[in-house]
């Protein structure tokens, strides 16, 4: 690894411990004891990831990050990804940190395994985001639009993480586009929702393979990892300015019409329209695909589940369009082959 990790903390023990753990994993680590030293450091050095303590004298972590973001904006610099180090365990601290642009929190004192996993996963996500953004820039210069081939290749890579799915992202994209077409989307919006469908599960890149492919029941902690994939996906896609709505499908396809979904508990029309379409397509494909614990569900039962989910899990309008598609599919061709 060649990533530069900077740790800012006024506690020498924390600096020494974190330095030892991350250096052992192959990261290049710089330790600084104050926010002021960090602001001086960034003038002359590049940083891949910043671990920033919240409670420090003079400038605390929030003030430091706020000043850092101002400096980045005024100097036209890309935002440095930040993980806050904190002994606090309250929602107010997390809300404030996330509003300033932090990507994660690590509780102190931390275990070596937790620090290593959090940092490695975030670095992987950052690298993927950078690779995506670089690819998009290249393709945009060539064709002034996002390359469909790049997106399809990425969708295939997402699906390849799951042993028990084959072509899930492509089918969700197809179903989403057909629902949207019947609803009245024009060609431009159809192309957009197709892209959104292809990348709706991109956040699963950041979920460990052994969790995605676990054949038995997930633990609460493992289920939380799965539930975090919409947030991860949104973080990966948020800087693709050529198609900003990609974030919509990634972040909100697991929201439910009755407000009981995740990650934000949005309800009804507060859920973006494209996400409501993708939610129906995603659920349909989940039911009509083979899984480690069951075969695909018979078509009649799929219809019953969609009917029961109207107004609860699904927007009734888009569920009805999906049901009309099923009614036309006499030979049950809309399924995993």
Image (cartoon, helix red, strand yellow):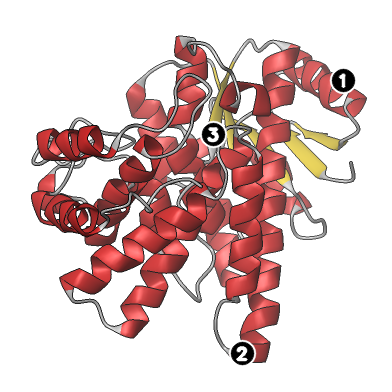
Q: CA distance from mark 1 to mark 2?
A: 47 Å
The quadrant the N terminus occupies is: top right
Q: Secondary structure at mark 3?
A: strand
Residue that sits furthest to the front in the current view: 331
Q: Residue at x 21, y 37 (%)?
A: 300
Is residue 25 at all visible to an observer of this figure? yes
Question: Which of these two is toward me, 172 or 233?
Answer: 172
Q: Secondary structure at mark 2?
A: helix
Residue 174, given in percent of the width and then of the height, sits at 40, 62
Q: Secondary structure at mark 1?
A: helix
Q: Residue at x 45, y 46 (%)?
A: 100
Q: Disc 2 or disc 3, which is closer to the eye? A: 2
Which mark, residue 104?
3
Q: CA distance from mark 2 to mark 3?
A: 36 Å
Residue 268, given in percent of the width and then of the height, sits at 11, 47
The part of the image, by quadrant, that contains residue 49 is top right
Query: Which numbered disc, 2 or 3, marks the residue that appears first in the sequence?
Result: 3
When the figure is inspected, residue 44 is found, relative to residue 21, above or below; the finding is: below
The part of the image, by quadrant, that contains residue 244 is bottom left
Q: Disc 1 or disc 2, which is closer to the eye? A: 2
Residue 129, given in percent of the width and then of the height, sits at 64, 56
Question: Which of these two is toward me, 279 or 4?
Answer: 279
Q: Which residue is mark 1?
A: 20
The part of the image, by quadrant, that contains residue 98 is top left
Question: Which of these two is toward me, 186 or 205?
Answer: 186
Which mark, residue 143?
2
When the figure is inspected, residue 186 is found, relative to residue 226, above or below; the finding is: below
Residue 161, given in percent of the width and then of the height, sits at 65, 38
Discs 1, 2 touching: Cβ within 8 Å: no
Relative horizontal placement of residue 116, taking residue 251 as reference (left or right) = right
Q: Disc 1 or disc 3, which is closer to the eye? A: 3
Q: Residue at x 25, y 63 (%)?
A: 179
């Amino acid at each position: 690894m060649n990533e530069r990790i900077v740790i800012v903390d006024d506690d020498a023990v924390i600096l020494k411990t974190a330095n030892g753990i991350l250096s052992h994993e192959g990261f290049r680590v710089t330790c600084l004891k104050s926010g002021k030293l960090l602001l001086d450091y960034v003038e002359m050095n590049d940083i891949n990831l910043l671990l920033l303590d919240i409670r420090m004298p003079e400038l605390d972590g929030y003030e430091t990050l706020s000043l850092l973001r101002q400096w980045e904006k005024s100097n036209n610099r890309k935002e440095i990804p930040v993980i806050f180090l904190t002994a606090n365990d309250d929602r107010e601290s997390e809300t404030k940190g996330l509003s300033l642009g932090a990507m994660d929190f690590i509780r102190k004192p931390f275990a070596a395994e937790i620090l290593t996993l959090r940092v490695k996963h975030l670095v992987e996500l950052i690298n993927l985001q950078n690779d995506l953004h670089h690819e998009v820039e290249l393709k945009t210069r060539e064709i002034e639009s996002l390359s469909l081939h790049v997106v399809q290749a990425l969708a295939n890579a997402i699906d390849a993480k799951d042993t028990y799915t084959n072509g899930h992202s492509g089918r969700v994209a197809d179903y989403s586009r057909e629902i949207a077409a019947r609803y009245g989307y024009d060609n431009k919006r159809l192309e957009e929702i197709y892209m959104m469908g292809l990348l709706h599960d991109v956040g699963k890149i950041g979920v460990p393979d052994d969790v995605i492919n676990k054949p038995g029941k997930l633990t609460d902690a493992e289920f939380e990892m799965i539930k975090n994939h919409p947030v991860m996906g949104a973080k990966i896609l948020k800087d693709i300015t050529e198609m900003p709505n990609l974030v919509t499908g990634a972040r909100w396809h697991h929201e439910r019409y009755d407000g009981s979904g995740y990650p934000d508990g949005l309800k009804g029309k507060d859920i973006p329209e494209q996400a409501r379409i993708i939610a129906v397509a995603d659920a349909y494909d989940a039911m009509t695909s083979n899984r480690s614990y069951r075969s695909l569900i018979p078509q009649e039962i799929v219809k019953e589940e969609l009917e029961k989910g109207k107004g609860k899990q699904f927007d009734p309008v888009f569920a009805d369009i999906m049901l009309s598609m099923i009614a036309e599919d006499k030979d049950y061709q809309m399924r995993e082959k």
